Image: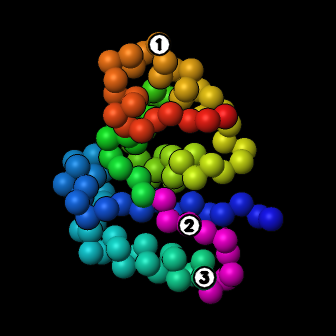
Amino acid sequence: MAPKIALPWLLEEDWPKWSELDARLPAHEQWLVTAERDVETARRLNLSWQKVIVRPDPFVVWCEVLKRPVDKYNRSIFAAVLSGQPGLEYYRRATTQELSPNLGDGRAQEAGLEFAI
């Protein structure tokens, strides 16, 4: 069975924070039109897919830990990690190893960054 495509899904309630993080994001309504078109394309092509809600705070912590830019590309990787996609063990393992000693202040748990490998 082929892995599901993880479509990063951004919630309207998080849009002010997303807009701060990525000035290139359009208004939520415009983003939603594009995202829904991606969903329709996946359906039409009979691809296995799932919407993965990506919240800004956990995503930013993840990017900080892995020293990755906060951008669209990494939102896609983060969504795939959250969905349990195979082949991304490095990101899960690195995140888990880095979070333990460096984020003992509770940010990891608040951000929901606890991965089972």
Q: Residue, x 27% and y 52% (percent of image)?
A: 18
Q: Earlier in the sequence, mark 1 or mark 3?
A: 3
Judging from the image, what secondary structure is the residue with disc 1 in? helix
Residue occupied by mark 2:
50
Residue 31 position within the rendered picture, expressed as x and y whole percent measured from the top left:
34, 70
Above or below: residue 113 compared with residue 96: below
Q: Which residues are magenta?
A: 44-52
Q: Give me the disc on residue 43.
A: 3
Magenta-span inclusion, residue 45? yes
Q: Give me the disc on residue 101.
A: 1
Separation of disc 1 and disc 2 at Cα? 32 Å
Q: Residue, x 80% and y 65% (percent of image)?
A: 1
Q: Amino acid at mark 3?
A: Arg
* Residue that lies at the very extreme toward the left in this rendered image: 16
Residue 86 position within the rendered picture, expressed as x and y whole percent measured from the top left:
71, 48
Q: Amino acid at mark 2?
A: Gln
